[in-house]
Image (tube, rainbow, N blue to C red):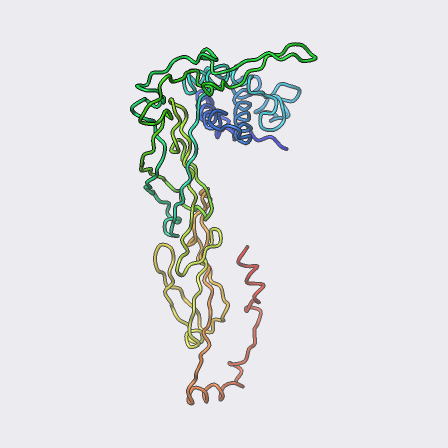
Amino acid sequence: MAKRDYYEILGLTKSATEKELKKAYRKLAIKFHPDKNPDDKGAEAKFKEAAEAYEVLTNGNKRARYDQYGHAGLDGGSGGGGSGGGGGMNMDDIFSQFGDIFGSSFGGGFGGSRGGRRQSRGSNLRVRVKLTLEDIAKGVEKKIKIQKNVGCDDCNATGAENGNLSTCHQCSGSGQATRIVNTPLGRMQTATTCPACNGQGQTASSACGSCSGQGLVKKSDEVTINIPAGVEDGMQLSVSGKGNAAPRGGIAGDLIVLIEEIPHDTLKRDGQNLHYDLYISFNDAALGCNPEIETIENKVKVKLDAGIQSGKILRLRGKGLPSVDRYGSGDLLIHVNVWTPQDLNEEQTKFFESNKDHENFQANPDGNNKSFFDKVKEMFR
């Protein structure tokens, strides 16, 4: 699999300064950090990918070779090493090389669960938000109320009575339990999360009565969600840190927002394009007319020439929905349907009978009258 451009990974250009590189890398590494994304292989790959890009672009010699020759200039072990997604950099390399740029973001060191106490993480919450086409066209701010776990005030989210914690007697506060195993290769030491304190390094001798020792209580909270224009039904948005809290100052989970689109009365959505069925009378089709059409923003008049045929598709460019990635807008496609008169009276019946053999009333399509399949192909150009 082809490797991505290092500048693209960090969201920067070739003129980026070292300060900009550091800032961009820090933002990505915090977002995809293993402690925030446990057991998420996709996040781990992006974490490694960002580290590889940062390692190359902050090295003067490597950056010069990369700028001139691309990834080919780093072959032979001079690049971030490895194919695709930071494959040549293991987690220990990353933590040891770049841990200093994160300060206390993860419990005083980079990688809160490595070599020390485990940092807990709250669970994610999921909510469903219903949007109209008008909401989707412009983007909208929604305020929703949710029930979620928050830290218990009485024990400062520790789960211990009066917040008093003591060092775990089983792991001596390390958060890890070690054991030595005899193998054919010799004695090997392994480390696992301490079962007595669940990796926290501390335990409560007496549980808090308000939260039953959980460190968390359920409360109502109002969350403001900024939904971008162009979202689609079934799309999920993630609001970082707005999910359930974690005990003892751990990392809060995320709020997952599921988009549900409310069907419009007259407009039908097809990706970024909108479709509108326009019905006109036989007289209007023969004589021409200027009907008013409903769009997302307002009503507009369109001109229908005399003799327009049923099945004609008119396109109003840019009157559809915007792309969620901000690359232009779709179109509004107007489908013309001529309503054939029914239940004619005697005078009307005589009129049509007297003209049925006239050439103006004969079906005689020319090259300008496209077939149904031509119209469908034209719609998707």
Task: Please tell me in which quadrant of the rendered image residue 146 appears.
Answer: top left
- Counting every numbered tag in the picture gives 0
Q: Is residue 313 above or below residue 23?
A: below
Residue visible at 45% across and 46% down in the picture: 323
Image side of residue 372 versus residue 288, left or right: right
Residue 255 picture location, percent across and down: 41, 36
Q: Is residue 187 above or below residue 47?
A: above
Compare residues 254 and 161 and report the one nearer the observer: 161
Compare residues 27 and 238 and report the one nearer the observer: 238
Q: Is residue 262 above or below residue 173?
A: below
Residue visible at 60% across and 30% down in the picture: 3
Task: Please tell me in which quadrant of the rendered image residue 223 appears.
Answer: top left
Compare residues 99 and 57 and report the one nearer the observer: 99
Residue 137 picture location, percent across and down: 39, 49
Residue 110 picture location, percent across and down: 47, 18
Residue 208 picture location, percent across and down: 33, 23
The N terminus sits in image quarter: top right
Task: Please tell me in which quadrant of the rendered image residue 242 appears.
Answer: top left
Residue visible at 58% across and 20% down in the picture: 90
Image side of residue 60 versus residue 207, left or right: right
Q: Is residue 167 above or below residue 31?
A: above
The C terminus sits in image quarter: bottom right
